[in-house]
Image (cartoon, grey):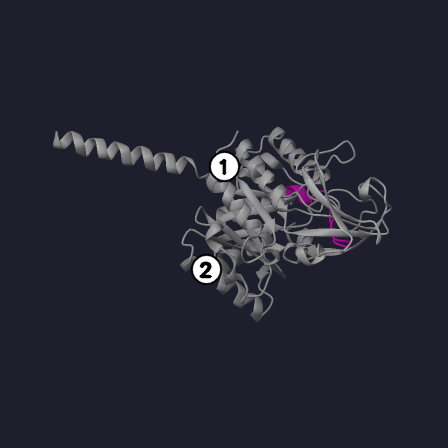
Amino acid sequence: MKKFRYLLVFLILFISSRDGFSQSNDFAVIAYYSGRPTQVDSFPIEKLTHIIFSFSHLKGNELHINNKRDTATILELVSLKRRNPNLKVLLSLGGWGGCVSCSDIFSSRKDRRYFAKSVERLSAYFGTDGIDLDWEYPAIEGFPGHTYKPEDIENFTALVKKLRRTLGKKYEISFAAGGFKQFIDHSIEWKKVMKEVNFVNLMTYDLVNGFDTTTGNHTPLFSTPHQMESTDHAVTQLIGLGVPVKKIIIGAAFYGRIWENVANTNFGMYQNGRYKHNVIFRDLDSLMIRDSGFVNYWDSIAQAPYLYNASQKLFMTYDDKKSMQLKTRYLVDKGLGGIMFWELAYDRYTDGLLDVIDKVKKNYKGK
């Protein structure tokens, strides 16, 4: 009887622990970070799996940290492992406007070798866990004036292969991918590249951006009759190209985009206008103060919020808590690898968008 009681207690504990585990989803929560070194410790770092320092750049053919502040930020990010021992810290190369020489440097086998060695060296020096390639964009036009050529596609493949051979399995490799059809169709040899990398971070934001003169949802979950580009559209494309679902990370925006001179038709949605500026999520409450003139609307097809100010003819597209919850549930239902966002410094220290992601991760069981 004594042995039976021990066995019964063991079974109860095992089942309870297994049920508890099943209630928490195992997906990546990845934050890009370009804020102050003294700021990052104020965020709920325990709710992240990865944080990506943004940005390192090329100096010649090597990965380079630009200044003392960047060095201090990286060291602070690595120190966060004391709070979150499972946290991965990656260095990111490039960013919008930060990859001016990528096309030329990565066209050379010798330069790719030197670059890979510099990534290995810096990672060992700082105690970081890998590299995120944010080349915007291989083979298609990105930042105005940056060189791009058709050979970038094969050179990008050669780059990630050299990185993997140099870094081994100890370090993670990911890359930021445009969440729009032109990038997906023309920038990457998907099957070859995805064999080498841990994740692809889909930038499913800025799908309507500062160069556009017509408003729309800049980070929608689903396509609409007026806007094909969306998170779901990009994910569906990648799955159709054979990208493993567990390596797909969808993107979310911790900021909104405002257009001006937008006519009061359809509450400003899909109207002509001129891009004005961004608003970070932390400052959203001040934008929505009483009598500000902004009214909140919900696109039930795109599953995305937007604001319109009729008196000032201002339109804003953004992510809020509801859309963040829906995006996170979407990735669970699809079995995707996780969610990333630009960027942590834009969130609130408490009761922010990261908290919404974490709540879904802990409590949502899927459809």
Residue 23 pos. (x, y %): 43, 37
Residue 217 pos. (x, y %): 73, 42
- The residue under label 1 is 364
- The residue under label 2 is 80
Q: Amino acid at mark 2?
A: Leu
Answer with the quarter of the image where residue 160 lies.
top right
**Mark nearer the N terminus (1 vs 2):** 2
Callout 1: few (<14), some (14-19), or many (20+) C-alpha neighbours within 10 Å? Answer: some
Helix, strand or loop for the magenta stretch, by majority: loop
- Which residue is at 47% across, 39% downward? 363
Circle 1 — which element? Answer: loop
Q: Which residues are magenta?
A: 142-154
Can you say whether 174 is above or below 53 in the image?
above
Q: Nearer the viewer, residue 92 or 159?
A: 92
Q: Amino acid at mark 1?
A: Tyr
| 316 in the magenta segment | no
- Label 1 – label 2 distance at C-alpha: 27 Å
Q: Nearer the viewer, residue 289 or 14?
A: 289
Q: Are marks 1 and 2 in contact (CB under 8 Å)?
A: no
- Farthest residue to the left: give it: 1
Residue 71 pos. (x, y %): 54, 67
153 displayed left or right of 247: right
Q: Nearer the viewer, residue 146 or 37?
A: 37
**Mark 1 or 2, closer to the camera:** 1
288 displayed left or right of 198: right
Circle 2 — which element? Answer: helix
